[in-house]
């Protein structure tokens, strides 16, 4: 068992949104109708996104019952609400009746998730997409740190419509000043991120300079990925998602397919090994960044568990954020380097250092 399961806390919402780009994930997994999928739950966003391709089942696993509650709430909202109501309830749009809406949909929740939300009704009232520790970390950045770096008009210009050429020029001439680099490296360094954003235990196997790596990737996001349509960019720099920049599962064109297939997603409290008991051969794996919380021995053991549950040619996708976890050559999962690198270049959730697609042989 990975030590993270014993040493990190799992009794609160760590992530109120999935901070991995579902667009590149779905391209990598190439899910077909009738496929069986295993997905790290997090807040549930990407597990729900997988439903667009009509899989037979998506088992969404998480060690944290609060994260399971996040998915169950979204699942209930998709079942019972129309599109605009869903966006209002979750927090994309303003709404004064979220508690009333919750009372209408709470019967769809398990008893444990219903108890969790009954005890955290203020997160419902505020909009659940703002209710995680990681989201609060970004709120602190946007509210207190970003204004020390740039004026409001400059920040607005950062997320406005621009060509890639204009983005590069804007970053070089207007954005990339000394305050930006200095304060960024402090706030997104190992200590501040461990204290305010992630659990310090998540940095156990990190050897690189955390802030410098993320700053380098942030330059990539500011210059080479369209900022106006990037939902993660908007949330971090403006504090909210915008109608023109929504995560995959919240886009109007995906609502009907997710709603129609909503019963195919099944939350499961546990880890990858828990799914060994399900006797399912999975065709697609969304593994988030779980491997970087493991030492190399645990990593190899987890890959062995995954292979025992994987169908022939199953597609296995995951990210490295801070630690290097690349599939060893002696394990018969072949990395598709061309697709991995191409999708990583497009990754709107830019702060990862690597995206890997493996094919089970």
Image: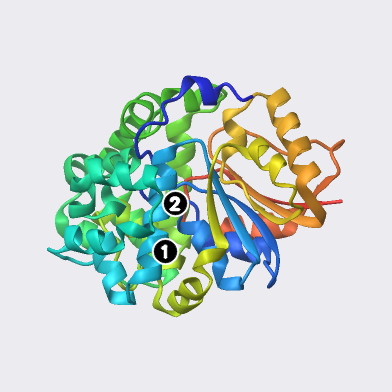
The residue located at (41%, 50%) in the rendering is: 110
Q: Is residue 339 left or right of residue 213?
A: right
Question: Disc 1 marks which residue?
Answer: 247
* Quarter of image, res 58: bottom right
Q: Is residue 297 left or right of residue 197?
A: right
Q: Is residue 145 left or right of residue 269?
A: left
In terms of depth relative to the viewer, which is nearer, 68 or 197? 68
- For label 1, the crowd category at 10 Å Cα-Cα, with few meaning under 14, some 14 to 19 and many 20 or more, is many
Q: What is the x, y in percent for residue 64? A: 45, 36
Question: Disc 2 marks which residue?
Answer: 18
In terms of depth relative to the viewer, which is nearer, 1 or 345? 1
Labels in figure, total: 2
- For label 2, the crowd category at 10 Å Cα-Cα, with few meaning under 14, some 14 to 19 and many 20 or more, is many
* Quarter of image, res 81: bottom left
Estimate the spatial distance between the alpha carbons at disc 2 and disc 1, rounded to whole Å: 9 Å
Is 109 rendered above or below residue 276? below
The residue located at (44%, 68%) in the rendering is: 164
Labelled pair 2, 1 in contact (Cβ < 8 Å): yes
- Residue 331 numbered mark, or none: none
Q: Is residue 179 left or right of residue 268?
A: left
Q: What is the x, y in percent for residue 300? A: 75, 31
Q: Earlier in the sequence, mark 2 or mark 1?
A: 2
Task: Please state, as top left, top right, bottom left or bottom right, where the N terminus lies in the image.
Answer: top right
Q: What is the x, y in percent for residue 100? A: 17, 62
* Whether residue 241 is visible: yes
In terms of depth relative to the viewer, which is nearer, 302 or 346? 302
Helix, strand or loop under label 1? loop
């Amino acid at each position: 068992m990975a030590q993270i399961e014993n040493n990190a806390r799992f009794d609160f919402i760590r992530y109120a949104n999935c901070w991995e780009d579902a667009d590149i994930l779905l391209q990598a997994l190439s899910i077909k109708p009738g496929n069986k999928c295993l997905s790290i739950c997090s807040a549930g966003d990407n597990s729900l996104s997988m439903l667009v391709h009509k899989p037979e089942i998506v088992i969404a696993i998480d060690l944290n019952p609060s994260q399971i509650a996040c998915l169950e709430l979204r699942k209930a909202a998709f079942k019972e609400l129309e599109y605009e109501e869903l966006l209002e309830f979750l927090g994309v749009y303003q709404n004064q009746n979220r508690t009333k809406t919750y009372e209408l949909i709470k019967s769809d929740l398990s008893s444990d998730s219903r108890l969790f939300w009954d005890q955290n009704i203020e997160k419902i009232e505020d909009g659940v997409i703002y209710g995680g520790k990681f989201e609060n970390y970004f709120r602190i950045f946007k509210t207190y740190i970003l204004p020390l770096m740039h004026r409001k008009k400059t920040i607005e210009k950062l997320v406005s419509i621009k060509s890639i050429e204009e983005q590069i020029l804007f970053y070089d001439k207007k954005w990339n000043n000394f305050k930006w680099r200095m304060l960024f490296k402090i706030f997104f360094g190992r200590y501040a991120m461990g204290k305010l954003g992630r659990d310090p235990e998540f940095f156990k196997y990190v050897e690189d300079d955390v802030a410098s790596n993320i700053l380098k990737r942030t330059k990539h996001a500011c210059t080479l990925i369209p900022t106006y349509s990037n939902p993660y960019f908007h949330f971090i720099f403006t504090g909210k998602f915008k109608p023109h920049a929504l995560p995959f599962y919240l886009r109007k064109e995906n609502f009907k397919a997710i709603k129609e297939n909503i019963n195919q997603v099944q939350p499961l409290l546990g880890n990858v090994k828990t799914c060994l008991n399900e006797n399912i051969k999975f065709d697609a794996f969304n593994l988030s960044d779980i491997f970087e919380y493991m030492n190399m021995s645990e990593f190899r053991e987890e890959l062995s568990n995954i292979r025992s549950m994987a169908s022939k040619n199953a597609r296995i996708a995951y990210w490295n954020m801070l630690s290097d976890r690349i599939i060893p050559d002696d394990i018969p999962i072949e990395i598709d380097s061309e697709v991995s690198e191409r999708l990583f270049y497009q990754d709107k959730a830019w702060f990862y250092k690597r995206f890997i697609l493996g094919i089970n042989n």
